Amino acid sequence: MSRAQAVARYLSERHGIAADRLSAAGAGMMAPLASNRSEERRARNRRVELVEIR
């Protein structure tokens, strides 16, 4: 299970957000915050961003 999918599942199960209102997509490979030359820098790229859609 991807990190984004795990966060969507957590929000649905623990916080009551309807699952059909959540969409999970990973973008870390396409929009890294740091190079992947060290474990510390790779950790910065492991993130989930929430985007509000109205």
Image (tube, grey):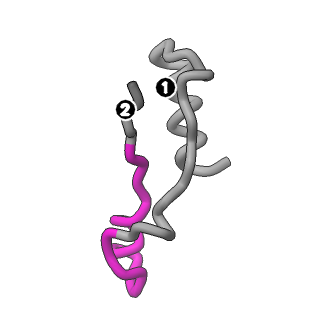
Q: Residue at x 46, y 63 (%)?
A: 28
Q: Position of residue 3 (x, y in %)?
A: 54, 49
In the rendered structure, which segment of residues is drawn in magenta?
33-49
Foreground: disc 1 or disc 2: 2
Q: Residue at the far right: name it.
A: 1
Query: In the rendered image, which residue does mark 1 sit on?
Result: 11
Image-based side of 52 in relation to 4, left or right: left
What residue is drawn where x is 60% and y is 41%?
Answer: 5
Q: Residue at x 50, y 12 (%)?
A: 16
The amino acid type, in three-letter code, at marker 2 is Glu
The residue positioned farthest toward the bottom in the image shown: 37
Q: Which one is nearer the viewer's eye here, 41 or 26? A: 26
Q: Circle 2 is placed at which residue position?
A: 52
Binning the other alpha carbons within 10 Å of mark 1 as few (below 14), some (14 to 19) or many (20 upward) gives: some
Above or below residue 38? Residue 31 is: above
Could you say where residue 37 lies in the image, as x and y percent from the top left? 40, 87
Foreground pick, 25 / 7: 25
- Report the amino acid beneath label 1: Leu
35 is within the stretch colored magenta: yes
The disc, 1 or 2, on the residue closer to the chain's N-terminal end is: 1
In-image side of 17 versus 33 (left or right): right
Q: Is residue 14 left or right of residue 5?
A: left
Please state the horizontal and vertical placement of residue 17, each as a whole percent of the image: 50, 17
The single residue placed furthest to the front in the displayed view is: 54
Residue 23 part of the magenta-drawn span: no
Q: Quadrant of residue 54?
A: top left
Residue 36 placement: quadrant: bottom left
Q: Circle 2 — which element?
A: loop
